[in-house]
Image (cartoon, rainbow, N blue to C red):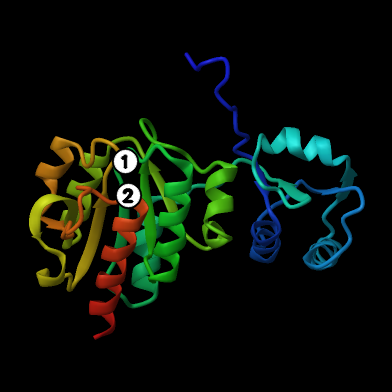
Amino acid sequence: MKKENEKQYNDNLVIGRNAVTELLKSGREIENVLIAKGEREGSINRIIALCKENGIVIKTVDRRKLDSLSQGGNHQGVAANVPEHEYSSVDDILGYAEEKGEKPFIIICDEIEDSHNLGAIIRTAEACGAHGVIIPKRRGVGLNFIVAKTSCGALEYMRVARVGNIADTIDRLKKENIWVYCADMDGQRWDKTDFGGGAALVVGNEGKGVGRLIKEKCDVTVSLPMLGKVNSLNASVAAGILMYEIARQRLD
């Protein structure tokens, strides 16, 4: 049961000017766009123009209504109501890699619970040329509006599959000749690891890291050096460093 003071985020609301602009440009179905009264400056005008181009209903609302819907999120005077986010499948991700003539590059999130972390991971994955992100149906955050906001529009271009069993999915990827790398402590050095070929990077929970069963399923464990007094990095930061190393090797 959720605590009484726990925020109930709306999975079907995208907030913020950049996130709404990218949503409008993506061609995804949108029910309507909400704009706060008096907001007619800067990028809001671009959003209004895109709505008119695409025949999307604009509703002018009191800023307090947006505050309430966003539950503390920085909406910047604009929000969009969309149907429930359409998840991709693992087949979609693999098919996209094949379509591009590239070895699959996939990020697997094992029980990421912080929406900001997932959004940041998706943003970096898109920037690095990853073909998709895989998240669990349970024990992890879904694609809510904070994820969309934090991804700064990248969510509209990134295929995200939600699966019932991460371990089974790893087995399936291995059959596709994809090597699975676990980001965790006590592994081999990240900069001495060969990420050539198909690669799937597993990023673990913010507190517990990668689960034992999932770690055992992985082919290689890779670690980042901790030279300071803390012994771990934020999940999205660690994932970003490793994703860019994979991207660098794929460019060589």
Q: Residue at x 65, y 37 (%)?
A: 72
Look at mark 2 in the image and give the residue it sits on. Answer: 235
Residue 165 pos. (x, y %): 28, 36
Q: Say which label, 2 or 1, has the lower sequence index.
A: 1
Mark 2 vs 1: CB contact within 8 A: yes
Res 169 quadrant in image: top left
248 w.r.t. 73: above or below: below
100 w.r.t. 142: above or below: below
Amino acid carrying mark 2 in the image:
Ala
Seen in the image, is 124 located left or right of residue 70? left
The secondary element bearing badge 1 is classed as: loop
**Residue 194 visible in the current orientation:** no
Neighbour tally class for label 2: few under 14, some 14-19, many 20 plus, Cα within 10 Å = many
Residue 86 pos. (x, y %): 55, 47
Query: Which residue is at the front of the view, 192 or 161?
Result: 192
Q: Residue at x 48, y 47 (%)?
A: 116
Q: CA distance from mark 2 to mark 1?
A: 6 Å
Q: Which mark is residue 206?
A: 1
Q: Residue at x 59, y 44 (%)?
A: 145
Res 66 quadrant in image: top right
| Location of the C terminus (image quadrant) | bottom left
Seen in the image, is 194 located left or right of residue 200? left
Q: Residue at x 11, y 68 (%)?
A: 193
